[in-house]
């Protein structure tokens, strides 16, 4: 053993040596520890824990280790005898063993993390503690919670503990949205690439929760979108962690909060724990923030200068500083309108991707050219649903047309682009209703469906009231209220043809 080396590390750490003493205490208590477990338990970066381990003589058993019981007396005066800071909801955990068991199964069965989206899974205990803290701090019956990204399944934890809470999830990952819906807990799901906008149906919430990409750009964007989805008197909770070695990173993130004119109601240190993220101690603080009268103008300003590079990895990482999307070759395609980022010298009118998705384009365009940068491929179905244009050419890699859009478009690859040509109006009643819904991508899906059903009944020589149409729709697709086709996850669009067909078939038994 090298007690001198341990003492040197503690002296260098100064007041922050509490972390090292905690780790030393755990290693001396007779338990076997893995490196990942010790990092997560102490919320200390992997580098710092490894520095301590190098100064200790350890017993090993496979991938685990401990200080030999005979050596522990030598460190008695160095141990952190006081417990770490109290967990604000630790006293509640023993009352929810069944929820923790269910969450453990849900987390284990969830879609695998995607490094290009900066996914790192929170522990089931963390998801449960988030739900418990929300219930301890706020009155949740009837409250509306928005989860801005939810790879950690916080939405499911909240519904398991507080089923009376109205919960909505917005996420770019179709797998997560489908998995959440599969659980049948009543969580609303909406597709959104937050760089391009927040769904219109994801507004006016009382609370918002987000565990965003840990860059100032990612934190700023996700927090701004969370605030965009809040009422003026709401609260936003943000998980963020940095290594004890890099306080400047935490400062930059807190600057992003300050630029949004937020007030701090609380910071819970190391509240969130993760499987991975060992560079930051597998832990993150939880910020509880409140908007002020100056927050909404600051949010609008922040979103007005939004860039697409917000992640730590992948084609849209901040560090890689991706170059501007190379100008596609328009030869052979006489575009009336350009969507996305294009060279300024091109004469055609143009519109930003975010604007294209947010509202219908006012002018008539027969041929639209879309530049879809790497990392934004998930927006393709929405780019096509946002228009009734006869022909759209989208430049980008790996852009297959979803089967759910085949009633609207016929597609083929053309060099490095996807050509989508609008099909003629279908003849069958069910296909005609479906086509009308998808032709109105910015309109409320259920409203268009209702009017199309009423028209289909009229074509059959019968009548259908609005209430009767609504009842048929809710029976076939209870998820369809208050969202547009652009906001709908792909698995919901895939369900739509069968649901529409069921309502059209029912017309023969519903109408006189």
Image: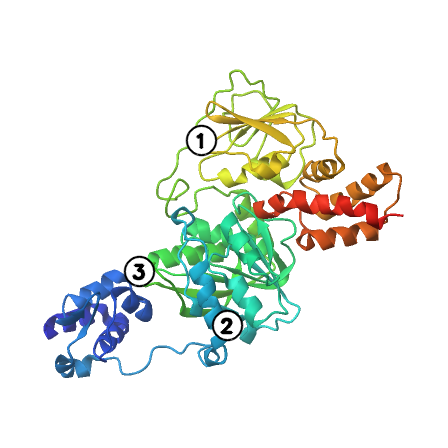
| Foreground residue among 428 and 62 | 428
Discs 1/2, front: 2
Q: Residues within 10 Å of mark 1 (few under 14, many from 20)?
A: some
Q: Residue at position x 60%, y 28% from top?
A: 410
Q: Secondary structure at mark 2?
A: helix
Residue 226 horizontal/vertical position (percent):
55, 56
Q: Residues within 10 Å of mark 2 (few under 14, many from 20)?
A: some
Q: Residues within 10 Å of mark 3 (few under 14, many from 20)?
A: many
Residue 46 horizontal/vertical position (percent):
26, 62
> From the viewer's perspective, is 108 left or right of 71?
right
Circle 3 is placed at which residue position?
278
Earlier sequence position, callout 1 versus callout 2: 2
Circle 2 is placed at which residue position?
99
- Residue 325: image tag: 1
Q: Quadrant of the N terminus?
A: bottom left
Q: What colour scheme does the image use?
A: rainbow
Q: Residue at position x 86%, y 49% from top?
A: 465
Earlier sequence position, callout 1 versus callout 3: 3
What separation in Å lies between label 1 and label 3 (alpha carbons)? Answer: 33 Å
Residue 172 seen: no
């Amino acid at each position: 053993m090298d007690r001198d080396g341990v003492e040197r590390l503690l002296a260098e750490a100064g007041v922050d040596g509490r972390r090292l003493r905690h780790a030393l205490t755990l290693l001396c208590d007779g338990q076997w520890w893995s490196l990942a477990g010790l990092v997560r338990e102490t919320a200390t970066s992997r580098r710092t824990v490894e520095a301590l381990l190098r100064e200790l003589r350890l017993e090993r058993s496979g991938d685990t280790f401990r200080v030999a019981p005979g050596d522990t007396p030598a460190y008695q005066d160095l141990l952190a005898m006081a417990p770490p800071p109290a967990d604000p909801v630790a006293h509640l955990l023993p009352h929810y063993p069944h929820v923790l068991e269910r969450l453990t199964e849900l987390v284990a069965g969830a879609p695998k993390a995607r490094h290009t989206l900066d996914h790192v899974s929170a522990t089931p205990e963390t998801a449960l503690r988030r739900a418990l803290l929300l219930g301890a701090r706020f009155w949740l019956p009837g409250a509306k919670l928005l989860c801005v990204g939810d790879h950690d399944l916080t939405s499911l934890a909240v519904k398991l503990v507080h089923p009376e809470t109205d919960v909505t999830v917005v996420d770019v990952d179709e797998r997560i949205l489908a998995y959440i819906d599969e659980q049948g807990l009543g969580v609303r799901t909406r597709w959104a690439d937050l760089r391009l906008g927040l769904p219109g149906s994801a507004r006016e919430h009382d609370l918002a929760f987000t565990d965003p990409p840990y860059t100032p750009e990612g934190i700023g964007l996700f927090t701004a979108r969370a605030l965009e989805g809040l009422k003026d008197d709401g609260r936003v909770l943000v998980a963020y962690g940095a290594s004890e070695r890099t306080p400047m990173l935490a400062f930059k993130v807190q600057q992003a909060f300050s630029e949004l004119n937020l007030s701090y109601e609380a910071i819970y240190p190391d509240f969130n724990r993760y499987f991975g993220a060992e560079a930051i101690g597998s832990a993150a603080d939880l910020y509880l923030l409140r908007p002020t009268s100056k927050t909404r103008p600051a949010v609008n300003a922040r979103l007005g200068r939004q860039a697409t590079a917000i992640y730590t990895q992948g084609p849209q990482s901040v560090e890689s500083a991706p170059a501007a999307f190379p100008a596609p070759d328009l030869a052979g395609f006489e575009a009336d309108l350009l969507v996305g980022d294009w060279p300024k010298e091109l004469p055609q009118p143009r519109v930003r991707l975010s604007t294209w998705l947010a509202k219908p384009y006012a002018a008539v365009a027969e041929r639209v050219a879309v530049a879809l940068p790497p990392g934004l491929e998930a927006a393709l179905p929405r780019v096509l649903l946002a228009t009734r244009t006869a022909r759209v050419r989208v430049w980008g890699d790996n852009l297959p047309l979803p089967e759910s859009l085949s009633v609207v478009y016929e597609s083929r690859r053309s060099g490095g682009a996807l050509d989508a040509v609008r099909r003629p109006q279908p003849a069958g009643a069910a296909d005609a209703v479906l086509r009308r819904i998808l032709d109105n991508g910015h309109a409320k899906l259920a409203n268009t469906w209702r009017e199309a059903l009423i028209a289909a009944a009229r074509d059959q020589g019968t009548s259908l009231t609005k209430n009767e149409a609504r009842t048929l729709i809710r029976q076939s697709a209870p998820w369809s209220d208050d969202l547009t086709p652009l906001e709908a996850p792909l698995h919901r669009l895939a369900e739509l043809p069968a649901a529409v067909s069921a309502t059209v078939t029912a017309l023969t038994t519903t109408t006189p």
